[in-house]
Amino acid sequence: MSAKQYFFNALIFDYLDFLKNIKGLSENTAKAYQRDLSKFSKFLESIAINSLEHITEEICSAWVADLFQNNVSARSIQRHISSAKGFFGYMKKISLVQSSPFELINSPKSPSRLPNILSPEEVSQLLSFKPKNIQDKRDIAIIELIYSSGLRVSEAVNSNLSDFEDNNNFLRVIGKGSKTRLVPVGRFAQNAIKIWIKERKNILTIDDALFVNLRGGRISARSIQERLKSIALMQGLPPVNPHMLRHSFATHLLESSGDLRSIQELLGHSSLSTTQIYTRLDYQHLIKVYENSHPRAHKKNA
């Protein structure tokens, strides 16, 4: 590693340490920042920039252009710029720079994509299989809980037996930024978890993890993703991922209640604007109802 690489990477590691220990960001989020900033570090090395004061707005713009030329998506470039802005904000905070060269760098607009969701009928179809073994019983409990409570897959993975409250009616969840929230657990999820916990006693484990693998260790997010995909295909559905269950939870709640603020709290969103994407999904649902129901919504077949 060259001296200039070491200098910049040392600052990156100092910033990541600040994010994890002071700001409370998760390990995965910190790794994403590290990947983005490492790309910037390599770009600086390629153009022989070896100090912070030599990094100008023009150089930052050139880096963004380089990302475009390497076919990095607009959404990913947004994240790269956000990572760099955060880094230089920290450099300014600790007085290593007077101003950020990214201050006037705007992020590119990315096409707005609505999340994929399952209909209530498809959720029922997904869960309409009879469990044949202990893994199946565990998987049903995982699916029911994620859909019932709108959990992220990481939140399901990190849930513990001791996190349940009020006779299993509520679950304490640690979300992004180590924020804790209390989410209700539906009747179907409670029943599935009760069945799974009985089976769990047959697995040798010293962990408090709610969901474990057959070796007794905490199940991984990857395992849940693979098992869910396999079950969906077995049930005659397209591939399903855990986040689709979370999106479905939010959309179905909004369709029946219209209470966006409560859904924001249940999902653990820090900003209402993040939750508002579901109003667009709900709008699409209303359009379909209108088109199928209103006598003048469309021409009848002759």
Image (cartoon, rainbow, N blue to C red):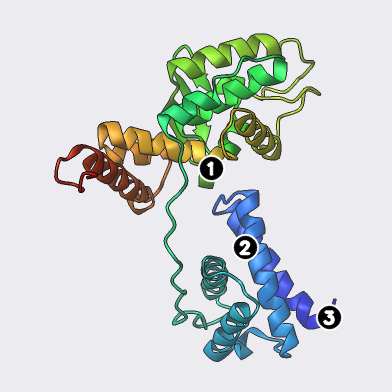
Query: Which one is in front in this view, the residue at disc 3 or the one at disc 2?
Result: 2
Q: Residue 178: which numbered mark, if any?
A: 1
Say which quarter of the image contains residue 210. Answer: top right
Q: Where is residue 107 in the image (x, y as percent from the top left)?
A: 47, 74
Chain-order first, disc 3 or disc 2: 3
Q: Residue 96: which numbered mark, if any?
A: none
Q: Position of residue 242 (x, y in %)?
A: 56, 38
Label 2 packing within 10 angstroms: few (<14), some (14-19), many (20+): many
Say which quarter of the image contains residue 235. Answer: top right
Q: Position of residue 51 (x, y in %)?
A: 68, 86
Q: Nearer the viewer, residue 172 or 255?
A: 255
Quarter of the figure with the C terminus: top left
SS category of the residue bearing label 2:
helix
Does the rendering let one see residue 14? no
Label 3 packing within 10 angstroms: few (<14), some (14-19), many (20+): few
In 3D space, how far apart are the residues under numbered discs 1 and 3 (Cα atoms)? 36 Å
